[in-house]
Image (cartoon, rainbow, N blue to C red):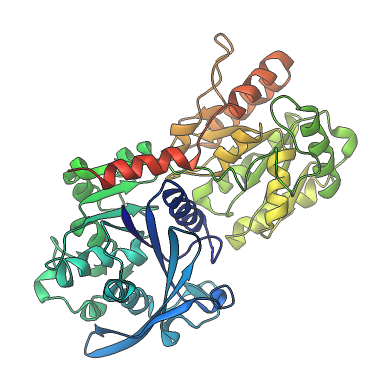
């Protein structure tokens, strides 16, 4: 098949979160399965060096933007026999310090930036001499692609359009006046169109004009059809449940594998767990926590420090977790108020809580390898990747049973010795603490702890499985 994938970021070129990992891994996996893949990205300033070898395909990609016409260019970089990346260049819109904004503020013209990007992708396709069978757009930044395709090129050739929701909380909401930038007739701005409580909702373009809708886990596909998780779109999504599918993201085991990880001091697998203890001692030394306490459990966390990830629960319960005998290793950055609360606790418990307010790729790997458990008390989690990494590293996950966390973590049952982690249902600090207590009690029972580690490391959430599921959706009648 010939597949076009469209998104706002992609590893190894540019990344702010899991979206980049998904697009990078899916594109590569589809190509390795024998399909031809072209992935479109904006040509941000941050990736110009990485795109230096790209060849200009056309420097006259012209699209309407409200009352004027804007011109861009498209460049192409060959990554492999069947994989290419196409960069849309428009320096007025994308040659900037940040991707989506600067100094914690979104760019005011983000609607214009990504509407131009989406229109330019469609306008660029003929220049690529590539007739696609599938057009697969991701998140609100690319949600306008299926709609613009239907308005411009759909009459010329038929293909399948797929739209993936990575996080429904981000919908691309803009003031009503920005609708003019779409160059759509006025009747497209309505409840059955792109209007949402008086605003322009770009994400709705993907929902309304795609043949297939997907989310990044089966559980999340069900959750977003409810008032609690639907972010105001639950009615629309429920009406489209026949074309809405959950496809669990895969884990990139080329980057996250304790047998080959270059960031850890000792590689290991389920047959060489003594080396995991070596990694734990090295982690304690790196974090300046007492190495002589290597016998005690260490709980790791690596994520944005925001309420969505449950950090208000963490800040409230750290004294109890320390009293239970565990130490914590937290890596991330985010909400300033939560960072201050955690810093005060780190000052209060300097030998039991390590807090690094930054993102450090190497340290993230070292926490995955050296911690005994990994805590993810998310209020919602469309998919989550760290719990999959933790399973592969034998770092037992403790999660709230929501979204992809519920699809990947099965509570350990001492009676049957089945299950790969610990989970809790209620979105409360007490429920989280109870799950932590169950994990710590199991940790003290060596036979059960080794079993849950082995169960965890036997799990396979590789991208090959996910890519095959996408292919089946691409080929649906």
- The answer to whether 390 appears left or right of 142 in the picture is right
Please say if 152 is above or below 257: below
- The answer to whether 17 appears left or right of 341 in the picture is left
Q: Nearer the viewer, residue 350 or 214?
A: 214
> Residue at the location (44% across, 55% down)?
27
Quadrant of residue 83 within the rendered picture: bottom left
Q: Nearer the viewer, residue 454 or 1?
A: 1
Inspect this view and state whether residue 228 appears. no
| Residue found farthest to the left | 187
User: Residue 30: x, y in percent?
Assistant: 41, 49
- The answer to whether 386 appears left or right of 235 in the picture is right
User: Residue 5: x, y in percent?
Assistant: 36, 60
Inspect this view and state whether residue 31 appears. yes
> Residue at the location (15% across, 70% down)?
151
> Residue at the location (84% across, 42% down)?
282
- The answer to whether 40 appears left or right of 15 in the picture is left
User: Residue 433: x, y in percent?
Assistant: 60, 31
| Residue found farthest to the top | 415
Quadrant of residue 396 within the rendered picture: top right
């Amino acid at each position: 098949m010939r597949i076009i994938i469209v998104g706002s970021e992609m590893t190894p070129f540019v990344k702010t979160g899991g979206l980049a990992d998904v697009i990078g891994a899916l594109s590569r996996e589809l190509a390795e399965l024998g399909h031809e893949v072209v992935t479109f990205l904006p040509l941000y300033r941050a990736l110009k060096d990485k795109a230096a070898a790209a060849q200009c395909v056309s420097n006259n990609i012209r699209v309407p933007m409200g009352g004027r016409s804007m011109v861009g260019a498209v460049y192409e970089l060959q990554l492999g026999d069947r994989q290419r990346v196409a960069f849309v260049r428009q320096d007025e819109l994308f040659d900037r310090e940040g991707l989506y904004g600067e100094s914690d503020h979104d760019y005011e013209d983000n609607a214009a930036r990504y509407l131009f990007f989406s229109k330019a992708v469609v306008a660029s396709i003929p220049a690529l001499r590539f007739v696609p069978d599938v057009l697969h757009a991701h998140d609100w930044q690319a949600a306008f692609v299926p709609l613009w395709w239907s308005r411009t090129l759909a009459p010329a050739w038929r293909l399948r359009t797929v739209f993936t929701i990575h996080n429904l909380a981000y919908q691309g909401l803009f003031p009503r006046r920005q609708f003019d930038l779409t160059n759509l007739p006025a009747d497209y701005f309505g409840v059955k169109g792109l209007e949402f409580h008086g605003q322009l909702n770009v994400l709705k373009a993907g929902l309304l004009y795609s043949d297939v809708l997907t989310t990044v886990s089966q559980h999340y596909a069900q959750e977003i059809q409810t008032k609690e998780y639907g972010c105001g779109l639950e009615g629309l999504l429920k009406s489209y449940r026949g074309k809405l599918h959950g496809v669990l993201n895969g884990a990139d085991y080329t980057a996250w594998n304790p047998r080959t990880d270059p960031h850890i001091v000792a590689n290991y697998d389920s047959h060489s767990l003594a080396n995991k203890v070596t990694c734990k001692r090295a982690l304690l030394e790196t974090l300046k926590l007492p190495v002589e306490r290597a016998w005690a459990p260490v709980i790791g966390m690596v994520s944005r420090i925001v309420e969505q990830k449950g950090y208000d629960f963490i800040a409230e319960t750290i004294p109890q977790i320390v009293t239970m005998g565990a130490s914590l290793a937290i890596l991330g950055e985010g909400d300033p108020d939560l960072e201050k609360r955690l810093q005060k606790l780190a000052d209060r418990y300097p030998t039991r809580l390590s807090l690094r307010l930054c993102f450090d790729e190497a340290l993230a790997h070292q926490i995955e390898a050296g911690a005994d458990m990994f805590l993810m008390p998310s209020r919602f989690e469309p998919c989550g990747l760290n719990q999959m990494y933790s399973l592969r590293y034998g770092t037992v996950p403790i999660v709230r049973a929501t979204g992809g966390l519920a699809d990947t973590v099965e509570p350990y049952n001492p009676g049957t010795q089945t299950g790969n982690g610990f989970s809790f249902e209620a979105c409360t600090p007490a429920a989280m603490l109870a799950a932590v207590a169950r994990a710590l009690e199991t940790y003290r029972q060596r036979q059960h702890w080794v079993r849950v580690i082995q169960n965890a490391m036997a799990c396979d959430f590789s991208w090959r499985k996910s890519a095959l599921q996408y292919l089946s959706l691409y080929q649906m009648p």
